Image: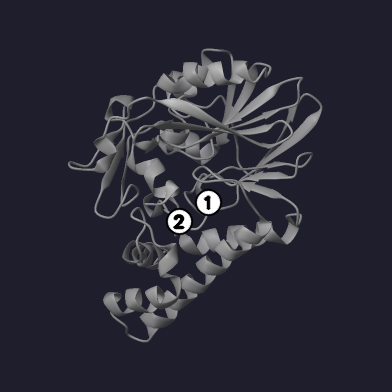
Amino acid sequence: MSRSARSLMIIAASWGLALAPGSLLAQRPTNIHVVTDSVTAGVYLLGVTSDQGPVLAQVTVFSTGAGALLIDTHAGQAAPLLQATLDGLGLPPITTAINTHWHPDHNNGNAAWRAKGVTVVAHENTRALLAHPQVATGLTGPGTEFRAPAVAPEGLPDLTFSDSLSLYVGEEMVRVFHPGPSHTGGDAVVWIPSRGVLHLGDLYWPGSFPSIDTHNGGTAVGLAHAIGEILKWLPEDATVLSGHGPSTDKKALELYHDMITETVDGVLEMSQAGKTDAQIVEGLDSDWSTWASPLVPTAQWVKLIRASQQK
């Protein structure tokens, strides 16, 4: 099983996520600890992991010495562990956190960090989704149902944006922007120009078919467009980060974009030719089977593409 798949498939039910009966998500992780990866000067990936594998989404930290910013907030129960890791790295206090989208593995720690005085930023659609109960199917594996209760006021973002926002960590600018409907309808992409680091949240699943929340504004067609537009301006030497998976580069993102565009176009062509779902899956598997994972096997990817094409 890929790291991207395991990172969603091992989540503690005790951390407040309502899950489908029998889902592997109901496992309770043991021996939880943080693995730190220094990406470049002042940028760190913090992966909360356990004996069973990664737990929830990873967290990214950007520090200039004059301040520090958090990308995604994980779970409230992990905040002390993450804070201890930050202290061990000798980083200044976190002043701002960005939620890349509404899925709880990226923002369940909001209340804990807000209690420390951290300002939480998100796209306006993300705050609206967090404020009400949500249900989505297939996000955590084929045939699963994902339920999230409304987030209490103390866990909601403080500051929202519609198109883009510029933040400053010390004197260094961080650009946050909405790429349009892609993984969800409220994604936030983060660009740190001084470090050449792009954080795509869950728009990017390195080496895997992506999970898309088609019930809440996500679309495979929109995802292909969003990645394509980003690639037009992204420097060749950029470092590319995501919510689940290792740091990669522009070349890896280009391969990912090729996969999405070619499979989306292929499903449309085969659908118009009258192919059955089974024939479409077989057709994709002939060229793209290495991108399938337990979280998003080929059949699930075909369903997500067709749901997107029907919008």
Where does the image place residue 261, in percent across and percent down from the top left?
53, 69
Q: Nearer the viewer, residue 11 or 302?
A: 11
Where does the image place residue 103, in percent across and percent down from the top left?
42, 39
Q: Outermost residue toward the top? A: 116
Q: Outermost residue toward the right? A: 171
CA–CA distance in space, label 1 to label 2:
7 Å
Q: Residue at x 73, y 55 (%)?
A: 234
Where does the image place residue 187, in percent across and percent down from the top left?
54, 45
Q: Secondary structure at mark 2?
A: loop
Q: Residue at x 50, y 52 (%)?
A: 205
Q: Quadrant of residue 192?
A: top right
Q: Earlier in the sequence, mark 1 or mark 2?
A: 1
Q: Are marks 1 and 2 in contact (CB under 8 Å)?
A: yes
Q: Report which residue position mark 2 lands on.
A: 210
Q: Residue at x 31, y 32 (%)?
A: 17
Q: Quadrant of residue 293?
A: bottom left
Disc on res. 217: none
Q: How many callouts does the rendering have? A: 2
Q: Residue at x 58, y 13 (%)?
A: 117
Where does the image place residue 270, in percent across and percent down from the top left?
39, 82
Q: Report which residue position mark 1 lands on.
A: 203
Amino acid type at mark 1: Leu
